[in-house]
Image (cartoon, grey):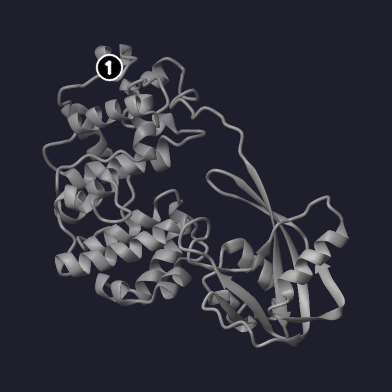
Amino acid sequence: MKRIIEETQVEPVAHEPAFSDAVIAWQKQHGRHKLPWQNTRDAYRIWLSEIMLQQTQVSAVIPYYERFLRRFPDVATLAAAPSEDVMAHWSGLGYYTRARNLHRCAQRVTDEYGGAFPADTLLLADLPGIGRSTAAAISAFAYGTRAAILDGNVKRVFARVFGVDGYPGQKKIEDQLWQRAEALLPLADIGSYTQGLMDLGATVCTRSKPSCGLCPLQKVCVALATDRVAELPVRKPKQTVPEKYTAMLVITDGAQVLLQQRPDSGIWGGLLSLPEVPDLLDEGSGALEDLLGAALLPYGVPENMGLERLLPFSHGFTHFKLHVAPYRITLARRLDTVGEATHVWLDAAKIADAPLPAPVKKLLLALFPQYSLI
């Protein structure tokens, strides 16, 4: 134990059964056992939960997971579904690349593996949206494969227990953490060990206000012994977050609103959203009205009252912050020129179930409150 307490740098280690034994024993007594995706060997359900849980809290995932399963109960159903249906059931969960990869992965598993997820972690990691850690988790839970995971929660546990200096996202540090993750694998009970690491990071060794007194590893934790729990893991170096600006057009015709499908790549890829024009900011209302007038030409003639400026909002993405200035334009006469596959007039009654980005859906439901509870 003394050797572990004094250790401050990550180095390859020999198998340490005391570590895994402590995690397994704690998980069986104090870990989570009643999550919807637990107590099953169904690789489809395990895979679905692992993808949804990437960068998303358990409490937020559970209702999406259950609703998704009701619509897509197996991998074949998901593979055969239209992409817009998949996106609609993912809408609001964020990080939409996950949904597109999920759909492509289901199609590959169906086409290449007859609908059965492979147990081999290398084959799993080759599928869309499944990296090394996720592949290990799927294989461990579904097939009992002895494979190491290293998600954000596990990195935090390792960084604190072993006193890891350096940002875990840095390749050199991450490689060393992978060496440790492999060395610490137990010879048996891999499912309980894997779940135990996840549970420790999610419920005990949390980012802020960790419950060190409840941790089964407190006696060998370098961070606790050296009063560095708040310092570890080392945070990512701060960078200035870029800010972008856009104007969204809420073009309505009675109880219908004009939507445009976004490209598959980029933010909100594949979802329906509002048409956009550059936000002119301080260039004056006249310039803005000219720009909006030109943007409206293909769709119809606005009412005499012109445009209505709605309450602006902001939305944070991983690499930038988007500031949106929405404008409502009510048409007096609609032109039948929106024949492009990328545009659609949507009934307001269908907004709640449409594949829309969460902030756009919130905006539209506020404009059509009579449909917000349907």
**SS at circle 1:** helix
The quarter of the image holding the N terminus is top left
Closest to the observer: 206 or 219?
206
For residue 190, what is the image quadrant? top left
Q: In the shown orientation, is residue 298 left or right of residue 301? A: left
Q: Which residue ends up furthest to the left in the rendered image?
A: 187
Residue shown at 47% from the left, 71% from the top:
88
Q: Is residue 90 above or below residue 20?
A: below
Residue shown at 23% from the left, 51% from the top:
126
Q: Is residue 240 above or below residue 132?
A: above
Residue 346: image x %, image y %? 60, 81
The type of residue carrying mark 1 is Ile
Residue shown at 65% from the left, 48% from the top:
244
Q: Residues within 10 Å of mark 1 (few under 14, many from 20)?
A: some
Residue 142: image x %, image y %? 19, 56
Closest to the observer: 306 or 39?
306
Residue 351: image x %, image y %? 59, 76
Closest to the observer: 190 or 54?
54
For residue 158, what is the image quadrant? top left
Q: In the shown orientation, is residue 40 left or right of residue 269? A: left
> Would you name the residue on which mark 1 appears?
4
Residue 119: image x %, image y %? 14, 54
Q: Is residue 161 above or below residue 321?
A: above
The quarter of the image holding the C terminus is bottom right
Q: Number of callouts in the render? A: 1
